[in-house]
Image (spheres, rainbow, N blue to C red):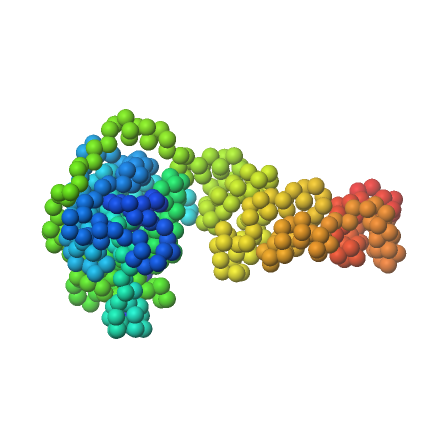
Amino acid sequence: MTVITELVPYDEALAAYDPVMGLEVHVELGTRTKMFCGCSTELGAEPNSQTCPTCLGMPGSLPVVNAVGVESAIKIGLALNCEIAEWCRFARKNYFYPDMPKNFQTSQYDEPIAFNGYLDVQLEDGEVFRVQIERAHMEEDTGKSTHVGGATGRIHGASHSLLDYNRAGIPLIEIVTKPIEGAGERAPEVAKAYVAELREVIKALGVSEARMEMGQMRCDVNLSLRPHGTEKFGTRSETKNVNSLRSVERAVRFEISRHAGVLNAGGTIVQETRHFHEEDGSTTSGRVKEEAEDYRYFPEPDLVPVAPSRAWVEELRQGLPELPRVRRNRLREEWGVSEHDMQSILNAGAVDLIVATTEAGAPSDQARKWWMGELARNANESGTSLDALPITPAQVARVAELVASGDLNDKLARQVIEGVLAGEGDPDTVVEKRGLKVVSDEGALGAAVDEAIAANAAVADKIRGGKVAAAGALVGAVMKATRGQADAARVRELILEKLGVEG
């Protein structure tokens, strides 16, 4: 990897330059078949087993548009506040890639299905930033190249390459922003928040799982700098196929520092694609970036234009689900939490988990308490996400129910959660195996209280003398004797009753 030595510290770069971003997000649609043929899109099949003459670009084969793909594109456009074209068509984008067997990509060029929209995104401090959408257009994915024999997994240094065309032809929607200006030092945060919000929109629509780690959603980060006080955009670089929210943020930050370093040294930014390196957050040069004319676009002669009727578009608009930002605002009001707390829940990825836990029967405050407390702590310590923890919302709801019924206290509940996470079974099984139920037998509690009073006569005398706060020491002794399985409030009541003191 080329070592970058001319980076300018981020704050210094922002003191001299304004960043301008453009984000291109590719979303693989969750259709059963490919965009222009009937081949399956199911993951995990043997290489090249899900292909046909059409997606392999064989002479004489003819494409047919996937109707569900068109419907999904319209839904995405509507959710992004776009205008939906009354008439649009596909084009051939010509270039050579070994994993594009036709040597052209069927895409849309100057006539996208959706255009001129926007998406409002909320930053961590609650500020709302509007990202303008240039277009959302339909196209197809490429195949997959695996470069073998090198140290980096890239073609340079590899001894040979393997090609799998199962993915070639899978439906894609590419969502392109207009130039994002005015973000300043918050540009990396804006980029991350935009991709995060877009992912939530896509998932809410049900058109894709949008799992970035699986390549179902990936972002190309275009960035340029211009000196403060100037209007003309600088030359841009395009960091390709960034596949996590954190990486989007890091790629923007790195490119700002790199561009500033080149410009400060009197150099010229090369318009190129770049590779992002997860291990250190850097980027390295890929290839010189083509302009639109280099692709020799022309209308696809084998496909008829797409002309969605206004009635169909309105029917799809009426059928849109509650979109994420609207839903979050509704939940915030229902739960009675502040903007700050709701943002924390969102940042933790806990919104859907809390909703599912309440739907399983837990009060919302208890659902929030466990997911944002004990479970968030466990996720942080294990370096995983909340939704990857081996516990379900229904199990968390059951823990909350056991606490509400008095069978568990909070300390015991934490042990139950620990057991579930350790794979010891569901909450009731863990309670049974570990013997964790609260001691509620009045006789057993009374005996434990008598023993604590007898063993701590001086403390008991203080309580009789009016120092009721000293009862905490006796409560602690009883809790220790019962391994934390007593009801602390009831223990305190018994202590005061036995010592003849009013609480």
Q: Residue at x 52, y 40 (%)?
A: 355
Residue 480 visible (yes or no)? yes
- The front one of 265 and 291 is 291
Residue 356: x, y in percent? 53, 41
Q: Give the total of numbered labels.
A: 0
Instruction: Place residue 101 in its image quadrant.
Output: bottom left
4 or 96: nearer the viewer: 96
Whether residue 234 is situated above or below residue 76 in the rendered picture: below
Residue located at (30% from left, 73% from top): 149
Residue 421 in the image, given as x and y percentages of width and height:
59, 56
Q: Residue at x 24, y 28 (%)?
A: 309
Residue sticking out furthest to the top: 311
Whether residue 221 is visible here, answered yes or no, is no
Q: Position of residue 188 (x, y in %)?
A: 33, 54
The quadrant of the image that shows the N terminus is bottom left
In the image, taking residue 311 as reference, residue 125 lies left or right, namely right
Looking at the image, residue 296 sits to the left or right of residue 192; the answer is left
Indicate the position of residue 497 as horizontal and vertical percent values: 85, 44
- On screen, residue 192 versus residue 447, left or right, reads left
Q: Nearer the viewer, residue 46 or 377?
A: 46
Residue at x 12% of width, y 54% of height: 294
- Quadrant for the C terminus, please: top right
